[in-house]
Image (tube, rainbow, N blue to C red):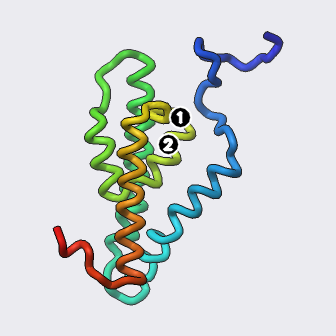
Amino acid sequence: MSDSRARRPEGRPSGGHVQHLKLKLVVLVIVCALPLFGSLSMWLRGISLVPLAAYGIVSVLAFFMYWADKRKARTDAWRTPENILHAVELAGGWPGALIAQQVFRHKTRKVSFQVLFWVIVLLHQVFWIDQLFLRLNLLNLF
């Protein structure tokens, strides 16, 4: 192969290059719009800074957890359990996790992981739709 880039055995490029970057950025902006608008709205109305801060802080934590897990996967070291990654996503770290999945090409091919990841994203979307538009207080059902 005349391509000078190093390739992984299965023919996929190593991490660092995000395929279809423009499309993935559009998806990121779309799925982050409601949580960002909702948490900013809560802060600006003097209700709480917690959701906005949590999305930022926990997303950074999730990004670094994915980075560490990817490094451990390459060296066959002890890995971060998937339920821990999902718990961090549920706590608000899913934007950072989504970015890390693409940057590190980590956990993108495991269907069961991706299904639960996108269910978590959907739960956040439903929460903010309820908070911003419906006012049904769906969270009180739990």
Q: Quick one: label 2, few (<14), some, or many (20+) residues within 10 Å?
A: many
Is residue 92 rendered to the left or right of residue 95? left
The three-letter code of the residue at mark 1 reads Phe
| Residue under numbered circle 2 | 100
Image spot of residue 51 (x, y percent): 35, 70
Is residue 3 rendered to the left or right of residue 124? right
The three-letter code of the residue at mark 2 reads Ala
Q: Gap between marks 1 and 2, in whole Å?
A: 6 Å
Q: Residue at x 48, y 71 (%)?
A: 34
Residue 39 sits above or below residue 12 on the image: below
Is residue 68 rendered to the left or right of residue 91? right
> Foreground residue, 58 or 107?
107
Image spot of residue 28 (x, y percent): 56, 56
Q: Residue at x 32, y 80 (%)?
A: 48
Q: Quadrant of residue 75?
A: top left
Q: Residue at x 36, y 77 (%)?
A: 130
Callout 1 touching callout 2 (CB < 8 Å): yes
- The quadrant in which the C terminus is found is bottom left
Image spot of residue 59 (x, y percent): 42, 54
> Foreground residue, 133 or 35?
133
Seen from this angle, which residue lies furthest right?
A: 2
Q: Is residue 108 visible?
A: yes
**Secondary structure under the numbered disc 1 in the rendered image:** helix
Residue 86 sits above or below residue 78 on the image: below
| Residue under numbered circle 1 | 104
Q: Residue at x 26, y 40 (%)?
A: 83
Q: Is residue 43 visible?
A: no
Is residue 94 rendered to the left or right of residue 18? left
